[in-house]
Amino acid sequence: CGKVMNKVVEFPIKLKKLGQDDPRRVVHSLKVGLAVLLVSLLYYVQPFYNGLGDTTMWAVITVVVVFEFSVGATLGRGLNRILATFLAGALGFGVHHLASISGEIGHPILIGIFVFLLAASVTFIRFFPRMKARFDYGLLIFILTFCLISVSGYREEEILEMAHKRVSTILIGAFTAVFVCIFICPVWAGDDLHNLVANNIEKLGSFLEGFGDEYFKVAGNGESNRAHLQGYTSVLNSKQSEETQANFARWEPRHGKFRYRHPWRHYLKIGNLNQQCAYRIETLNGYLNSEIQTPLNIQSNKVQELCMKMSSESGKALKELAWALKTMTEPCAAASSHITKSRAAANNLTSMFRTSAAAAAGEGGYQVRLQDMVPA
Amino acid sequence: CGKVMNKVVEFPIKLKKLGQDDPRRVVHSLKVGLAVLLVSLLYYVQPFYNGLGDTTMWAVITVVVVFEFSVGATLGRGLNRILATFLAGALGFGVHHLASISGEIGHPILIGIFVFLLAASVTFIRFFPRMKARFDYGLLIFILTFCLISVSGYREEEILEMAHKRVSTILIGAFTAVFVCIFICPVWAGDDLHNLVANNIEKLGSFLEGFGDEYFKVAGNGESNRAHLQGYTSVLNSKQSEETQANFARWEPRHGKFRYRHPWRHYLKIGNLNQQCAYRIETLNGYLNSEIQTPLNIQSNKVQELCMKMSSESGKALKELAWALKTMTEPCAAASSHITKSRAAANNLTSMFRTSAAAAAGEGGYQVRLQDMVPA
C-alpha cells in the first residue's frame, strides 16, 4: 500500500521532469489536442457532415494515427497513408469489378484468393530492411484498405462512393495533422539529427581533453571530474536513434539551413565513426578504474607530458570539428593545428620507445590506439 | 534504364534470400493471409453480417493491425487494443451522456473541451519510457476510440450500440489474430531473446579462442580465419533488439521451457555484459589490423604461450557458459576450470612483468583488460 502511495506521489514529479527535460513534449501534446479538435469540427459543421456522413471518423482516425513528434515522421506517415489508400483503393475496386462479373459463386471465391495472396505477399515485402525503414506503415495500410474495399464490396452497392469518401477523409485528416505539425512550433527531425551528431563529437572531445589530467591525477580533485567524463557513454548506443532520425529527415522539406535533399546519410557515416571512437574511449576509460598503478617509469615527466598532449590535443581537435559541424562552417585552421600537435606528440612518443626497446611492446599498442582516434 | 533493369532482375533474388535467411518469414506471411481470409468470412456468412453490419470492417482492420511476427508482439498489441477500446468506449459514453444533458449549445463545447484535454494529456503520457515500451499502442487507441465515440455521439443516436459493436468486432479480430499466431507455427519472442543472448556469448568466446593464433600468426593461413573472428561485431549493436524482444516476451504465456514470469530482464543484464565485453574485444581486434609489428621480446616463447592461454581459456569458458545458457543447465565444472586456468596464466604474466619492471607499464594494462572479460 505504501508502495502504491509512493508511486502516486512520484507521478506528478515525474510528469514535471518529463516536461522540463524537453519542453517540446508539452507543446507537441497540445498540438495533438488542437489537431483532433480541428478535425472534430467536421462533425459539427452541417455541410461537411452532409457530404461525408459516417466516414468523417476516418479523418479523426487519420489525425490521431498520423501525428508524430517530428515533422519528418508526420509527413512520412501521412504520405504513406494517402498513397497506400489511393493505390489499394484503386486495386481493390479493380478486383471487385473483376470478381463481380464472374457470377454468384465465383465472386466470393475469387475475392478470397486475391485477399489471401495480396495480404501474404505484401506482408513478406515488409521484411525488406529498406521497405521497413521508409514504407512499413504504407504497406500495412495498403493491405488494410485493399481488404476493406474488395471484401466489403461484396455487400456494399456503392463501392466507388465508399472508396472516394475514404480517400477524401484521409486526405483531410492527413493535411490537418501535417498543417498543425509544420506551422505551430515545428520539431524537425533533421535539426535533431544534426545536433545529436555534433554533440556526440563534442562529448568524445571532452573525454579526451580531460582524460590526461584524470589518468595522471594532475587535477587531483577525484570523483567529481570523473563523472563529468562519462558523457561519452551515450554515444555507444546512439546508432539506432540516428538511423531513425535520418529516415524521418528525408521526408522533410527545406527548412532553416537544410535543403530538401540534404545529405543525411553522411551524418550516419560520421555517427559510425563516433561509435568506433567511443568503443576505444570505453577501453581507455577502463584504465581509469583499473587497480593497476601507473608504473613509475611512465610517470617520468617527458612521457606524461607527451601522453597528455596527445590526448588533450586530439580532444580539442574533435571539439573544433563539432563546433564547425554545429555552425555548418568550414573547420577552422585551429582544428588541423591541434591534430598536427597531437600527431607530433604521438610520433615523439613512438621514437622515444623505439630507442628504449624494452618498453616498446605495450606502449606501442597504447599509442596506436590514440592515433587511431585522431582521424575520427 | 540499365539500372532499373538490374533492380528488377535482382528483386526475386533478394526475395529468395530474405526467405532463406529466416524461413519463418514465409510462414508468417502465409499466416497473415490466412487470418485476413478467416475474418473476411464474417462478411460472407449471413447471420454474422446481419448482426454486425458495417462494423464488420473493424474486425478486418484489427487483424491486419494487430498481427505481428512474434506471439508476444501480437498478444501485446491485441490486449492493448481490446483494453484501450473498452476503457475509452466507456469513458466516451460517459462524457457523451454528461454533455448531452447540458443543452443544445453546451453539448459541442463540452465535448470539444474534453477531447482536447484527453488527447493532449494522453499524448504526453506516451512520452514516459515505461509506458512507451509496453502500452504505446494502447494509449494511441485510447485517444482514437474516445474521440470517435464522444464526437460521433453528437450525430449518432444509437451510440451505445455503436460502442458495443466496436468492442465486439475488435474482440473477434484480435482473437482471430492471436489464435492463428499461437496455433500455427508460433514464433516466440522469448525463444528468440534466449537464443540471441546465448549466441552472442558464443561469438565472443569464438573470438577470444581464435585471437591468440591470429595475433601471433601461429596458424598462418591469413585472411580466411580473420573474417571468421568478426562475428562479434553484431554483439556491439544488439542492445536495441534485446530490449524489444524482452518487452514482447513479457506478454507471452508459458511455452516450452519458459514459465509465464520467466526472468526476462536478466537476459538484458547478460546482454549488457556481452556488450561491455564486445567493446573490449573491438579494441583487441584493432591490434590485429595495426601496422605495428609485435616486438621480438614479446614473441619469446614464454610470454606468447601465456597470452595465448589466457585468451583461449577465457574464450572456452565463455563458450561453456553459452552452452549452459542455451540448454538451461547448470554451467559444468569445465567452465570454472577454464576460468581458473586463464586467471593463472594472467597472474603468471603479471608476476613475470613485475620482475622485469621496464615492460610492466603496457602489458599490465593489456592483462587487466583480459581479466575484466573473464567474469562476463
Image (cartoon, coloured by chain):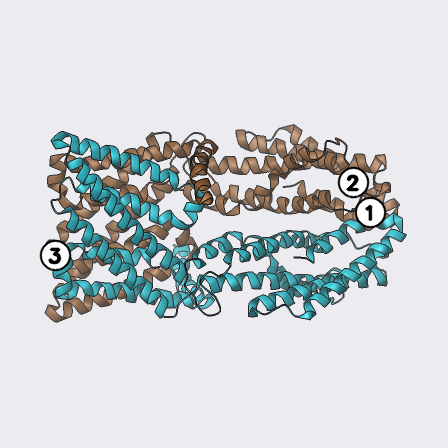
Chain colours: A cyan, B brown
Q: Quadrant of residue B258?
A: top left
Query: x%, y% of residue A128?
Result: 43, 42
Circle 1: residue type: Ala
Circle 2: residue type: Asn
Q: Is residue A259 left or right of residue A152?
A: right
Residue at horizontal 67 percent and vertical 42 percent from the top: B373
Query: x%, y% of residue A204?
Result: 63, 60
Q: Is residue A145 in view from this perspective?
A: no
Q: Which residue is mark 2?
A: B347
Q: Which residue is mark 1?
A: A361
Q: Nearer the viewer, residue B50 or B118?
A: B50
Label 1 SS = helix
Label 2 SS = helix
Q: Mark 3 near mark 1, Cβ–Cβ under 8 Å? A: no
Q: Is residue B360 left or right of residue B288?
A: right
Q: Quadrant of the N terminus of chain B?
A: top left
Please state the chain letter of the residue tagged with numbered disc 2 in the rendered image: B
- Of labels 2 and 3, earlier in sequence is 3
Q: Nearer the viewer, residue B215 or A293?
A: B215
State the separation of the CA atoms marked 2 and 3: 80 Å
